Image (cartoon, helix red, strand yellow):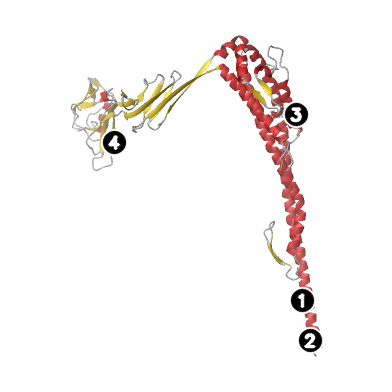
């Protein structure tokens, strides 16, 4: 007797109030019996999901094996006459790094040489910058006359005389600054069109009644100082002084100072560009590494990739045969025919004779199986064969019916997207899981109805018992009254 909350319907009921029968416990036990088929379906679903995960992983690893074999085949599939030349080709890879990338950035080209240096950014390159007095608007007029400015020993003269043009060093710019166009805007346009190494622009400072100011600046470097002759009453004042960038090579006692007009240095190390970003008072290690890789290295790497991919496939299959000591059971796909067939076909190629050339076995080039079916590569033996029997190695790996071609054919049989053995298994297993999910959902719905029926039946029993109890009470009272007459 007591309160019962249903995990299926969410309803709350009271049982055994009239009869004293533990109806709630009885209903729960009956539902547990009814749930057993669902539990079996859930177990089957979990089992198939485990199998699906393994099949998908195996399919992915077999795809990787196929791709590694393609890479190897493409690398060695060149004409016999040119193969030796391809083999002897070298590729240089250059990398450059800075220990403080926030202070100095470094990039390298293929012509760079390996080197390690220590620098400190002592000073950044700056440009000369001058700012005029304030004006109320960009359309304010300026005084007619001659404006002259000298940069790096070269003087540029602007004649603004109100005659519809601006003359720069005796040449008409075509810029109209006659009234009412003899304005700040016209002056800035004339500066930018002058051909001098100058840039001019107007800035609205937002301050006071005369917020507009003309800025003139040049290129970075100490030689790019700007000096004015007549400035047409613009009253320029210097805001920033031009200076060179300076690096200290091997900072400390005996350091060498290196200066340049920009923050980029390209002649400290051949093929290396060092860009100073900010001063920091810290030593910066610039490291440039150039690695030369021969085609032999690339071929060895490609073969190592094939061996690694092959072992990934075989390892998944081997894991299924491992027995868990706690359950005394193997993997979900132990002795599975698909996995057994895949491993057998792959290993048979490793152990078989390939072609009729001087190299017909993978053992001859340092590839062999251990007793667990895992490939081992003797790199020294492989490199020796590449040096002494280059064309024989090429013939073993490349072309129709070659080592790589036969392994790839096996892989394709299992991973073909249309009728591959693994793909078909994955599709079938996925369909089985979907069917189990649907069956579980249907069974859960039936279980809800069973619970509702049980609650309804026991509730009817409680009402019947309650009615009988009331009738018995009435009879007791009637008999007692009769006896007292």
Mark 3 Cα within 10 Å, few/some/many (few <14, many 20+)?
A: few
Which disc, if any, is residue 341?
A: 3
Q: Position of residue 227 (x, y in %)?
A: 21, 26
Contact? badges 3 and 1 (CB < 8 Å): no
Q: Position of residue 197 (x, y in %)?
A: 28, 24
Q: How far apart are marks 1 and 2 (CA)?
A: 17 Å
Residue at numbered disc 2 = 481
Mark 1 vs mark 4: in front: 1
Which disc, if any, is residue 133?
A: none
Mark 2 Cα within 10 Å, few/some/many (few <14, many 20+)?
A: few
Q: Distance between the residues labelled 4 and 3?
A: 78 Å
Contact? badges 2 and 3 (CB < 8 Å): no
Residue 449 appears in the picture as rendered: yes
Residue shown at 79% from the left, 83% from the top:
478
Query: Which residue is at the front of the view, 390 or 408?
Result: 390
Which disc, if any, is residue 470?
A: 1
Contact? badges 4 and 3 (CB < 8 Å): no
Contact? badges 1 and 2 (CB < 8 Å): no
Q: How far apart are marks 1 and 4 (CA)?
A: 100 Å
N-term mark: 1 or 4: 4
N-term mark: 4 or 3: 4
Name the element at disc 4: strand
Q: Position of residue 293 (x, y in %)?
A: 53, 18
Q: How far apart are marks 3 and 1 (CA)?
A: 77 Å
**In the visual, does 348 lie left or right of 248?**
right
Q: Distance between the residues labelled 4 and 2?
A: 113 Å
Query: Which residue is at the front of the view, 342 or 285?
Result: 285
**In the visual, does 320 lie left or right of 227?**
right
**In the visual, does 465 lie left or right of 224?**
right
Which disc, if any, is residue 203?
A: 4
Residue 186 appears in the picture as rendered: no
N-term mark: 3 or 1: 3
């Amino acid at each position: 007797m007591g309160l019962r909350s249903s995990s299926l319907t969410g309803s709350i009921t009271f049982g055994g109030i009239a009869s004293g029968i533990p109806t709630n416990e009885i209903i729960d036990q009956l539902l547990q019996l009814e749930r057993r088929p669902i539990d079996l379906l859930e177990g089957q679903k979990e089992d198939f999901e485990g199998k699906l995960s393994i099949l998908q992983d195996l399919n992915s690893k077999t795809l990787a094996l196929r791709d590694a074999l393609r890479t190897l085949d493409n690398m060695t599939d060149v004409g016999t006459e040119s193969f030796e030349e391809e083999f002897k080709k070298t590729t240089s890879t250059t990398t450059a790094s800075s220990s403080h990338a926030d202070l100095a950035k470094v990039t390298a080209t293929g012509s760079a040489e390996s080197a390690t240096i220590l620098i400190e950014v002592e000073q950044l390159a700056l440009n000369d910058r001058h700012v005029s007095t304030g004006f109320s608007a960009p359309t304010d007029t300026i005084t007619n006359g001659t404006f002259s400015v000298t940069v790096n020993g070269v003087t540029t003269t602007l004649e603004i005389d109100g005659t519809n043009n601006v003359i720069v060093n005796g040449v008409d710019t075509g810029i109209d600054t006659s009234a009412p166009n003899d304005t700040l805007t016209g002056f800035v346009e004339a500066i930018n069109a002058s051909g001098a190494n100058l840039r001019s622009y107007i800035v609205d400072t937002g301050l006071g009644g005369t917020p507009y100011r003309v800025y003139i600046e040049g290129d970075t470097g100490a030689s790019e100082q700007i000096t004015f002759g007549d400035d047409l009453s613009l009253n320029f004042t210097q805001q920033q002084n031009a200076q060179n960038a300076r690096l200290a090579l091997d900072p400390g006692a005996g350091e060498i100072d290196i200066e340049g007009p920009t923050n980029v240095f390209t002649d400290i190390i051949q093929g290396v560009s060092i860009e100073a970003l900010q001063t920091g008072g810290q030593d910066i290690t610039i490291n440039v590494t150039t690695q030369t890789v021969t085609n032999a290295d690339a071929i060895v790497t490609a073969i190592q990739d094939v061996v690694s991919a092959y072992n990934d496939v075989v390892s998944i299959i081997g894991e299924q045969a491992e027995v868990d000591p706690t359950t005394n059971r193997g993997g979900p796909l132990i002795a599975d025919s698909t996995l057994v067939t895949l491993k057998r076909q792959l290993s048979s190629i490793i152990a078989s004779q390939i072609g009729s050339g001087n190299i017909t076995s993978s053992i001859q080039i340092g590839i062999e199986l251990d007793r667990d079916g895992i490939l081992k590569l003797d790199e020294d033996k492989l490199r020796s064969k590449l040096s002494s029997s280059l064309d024989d190695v090429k013939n073993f790996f490349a072309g129709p019916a070659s080592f790589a071609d036969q392994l790839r054919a096996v892989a394709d049989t299992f991973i073909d997207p249309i009728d591959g053995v693994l793909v078909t298994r994955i599709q079938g297993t996925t369909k089985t899981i979907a069917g189990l999910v649907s069956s579980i959902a249907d069974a859960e719905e039936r279980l809800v109805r069973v619970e509702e029926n049980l609650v309804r039946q026991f509730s009817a029993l409680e009402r019947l018992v309650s009615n009988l109890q009331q009738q018995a009470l009435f009879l007791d009272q009637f008999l007692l009254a009769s006896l007292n007459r």
